[in-house]
Image (cartoon, grey):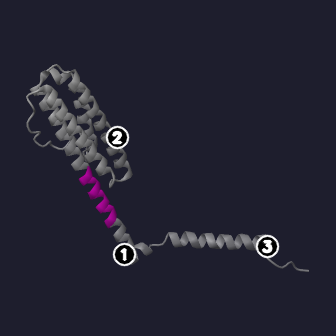
Amino acid sequence: MRRTGTTRRGALTATGALALGAVLTGCGDDDEETGRGAARSGSRAGAVRAEKALRTTAARTSAAMAARYELVARTHPATAAGLAPLRAAVREHAKALAPGAGRAAPPAAPGRVSADARTALRELAAAERRTADAHAEALLTAEPELARLLASVAGAAAAHAYLLTELAEEIPS
């Protein structure tokens, strides 16, 4: 009497045929023929351009902050020692954010600095808060790797704002 129903050999053959069909379907060049491949490469190029634009903007923002630090330190030499580590960190942020080989974008003109050292430090702290906000906003549209970098730099800018506020309290009038 012959056994009816599914045998082990039949089940393995059917499973192998289904797996082979799935592999062959996934390996086809249908994307290029239907135009989806071109759309994917176009969207990749768009993503690269968008990331470069985000990096350029973020690097310019950090470079402008570094220029502000330089200006405050030159205008108020008593603050130079306290600003040195923060200024170095901001320069490194600009390098890390710069697209390409890590060269920072040229900074914009930092503007004027208050004649009072405490006021200048408070203005620098406010600028750091604006920088933190700008980086935090930019990370919402960034790719994951760049978003992590922007989040780190935004956190550092917020910490710098706090430290600058504390430094303003310690500087004699």
Depth check, front residue: 27 or 71: 71
- Disc 3 target residue: 7
Residue at 36%, 75% in the rendered image: 35
* Residue numbers of the magenta segment: 42-54
Residue at 23%, 38% in the rendered image: 128
Q: Is residue 170 above or below residue 56?
A: above
- Disc 2 target residue: 152
In which quadrant is the N terminus drawn? bottom right
Q: Position of residue 109 (x, y in %)?
A: 10, 41
Mark 2 or 1: in front is 2
Determine the image quadrant of residue 20: bottom right
Q: Position of residue 133 (x, y in %)?
A: 27, 45
Depth check, front residue: 166 or 62: 166
Helix, strand or loop for disc 1: loop
Three-letter residue code for mark 3: Thr
Three-letter residue code for mark 1: Gly
Q: Is 117 on the left or on the right of 165, as rendered?
A: left
Q: Is 21 on the left or on the right of 110, as rendered?
A: right
How far is mark 1 from mark 3, CA to CA? Answer: 44 Å
Q: Position of residue 67 (x, y in %)?
A: 15, 36
- Disc 1 target residue: 35
Total marks shown come to 3
In which quadrant is the C terminus drawn? top left
